[in-house]
Image: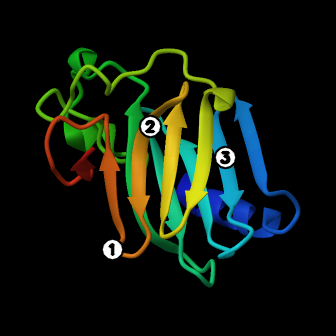
Amino acid sequence: MNLILLSIFTSVFAIGTLKTRTENNTDGIFITSTDPISGRTLMIEEDEYSIWVYVLNPDKQGIDFDGFLCSVVDPESITLSPKEATKNGNAPPLTIDYANKYSYIKNLKSNDIKVYWKYNRIEIKLKKETYLIMDLENKTSYSKALSKDCYYGNTL
């Protein structure tokens, strides 16, 4: 949770300086993107198990809604309990109950991720393939990395 709050703080101060800002360091992937037309901002952030996309509120004071992009750890290899996995403030790792063949992407890099702002939606592509659609009007996310609708989001 602290990482998320720090990321929000960092992205708010980055707004207006660059349309898209990318970092790929030992902490994982971190990308911000602002739509030049609507002024809406999103963040893409890797935690210990997953990569999440957060759409900020129009006033940029907190998260409006989020979407699950993919897992950076093979769901079949996770042996931790949800309590143990979330003790650092991360979302729980994706379980095999909701995983599919698109869920786990090995060695994903920031430059593999592209953000496309469309009217009332955002499309996120991984390696030129649409993985996440975020419906701005209904505040709903649709992920290719999910096998069924769940608390992580809806299937694409």
- Residue at 13 percent of width and 42 percent of height: 148
In which image quadrant can residue 75 be found?
top left
Q: Position of residue 108 (x, y in %)?
A: 55, 22
For the residues carrying marks 3 and 2, which lies nearer the camera in this image?
2
Q: Amino acid at mark 3?
A: Ile
- Residue at 73 percent of width and 69 percent of height: 12
**Res. 139 in view:** yes
- Residue at 22 percent of width and 40 percent of height: 82
Pointer 1 residue:
138
Tags 1 and 2 touching, CB below 8 Å: no
Q: Amino acid at mark 1?
A: Asn
Mark 1 vs mark 3: which is more N-terminal? Answer: 3
Q: Is residue 46 left or right of residue 147?
A: right
Pointer 2 residue:
130
Q: Residues within 10 Å of mark 3 (few under 14, many from 20)?
A: many
Q: Is residue 118 left or right of residue 89?
A: right
In which image quadrant can residue 72 be found?
top left
Mark 1 vs mark 2: which is more N-terminal? Answer: 2
Helix, strand or loop at mark 3? strand
**Res. 90 in view:** no
56, above or below 84, in the image? below
Mark sitting on residue 84: none
Outermost residue toward the right in this view: 17
What distance separates the C-alpha of mark 3 from that of mark 2?
Answer: 17 Å
Pointer 3 residue:
31
What distance separates the C-alpha of mark 1 from that of mark 2?
Answer: 19 Å
Q: Is residue 110 left or right of residue 121?
A: right
Helix, strand or loop at mark 2? strand
Q: Residues within 10 Å of mark 1 (few under 14, many from 20)?
A: few
**Residue situated in front as seen by the camera: 73 or 15:** 15
Q: Position of residue 146 (x, y in %)?
A: 24, 37
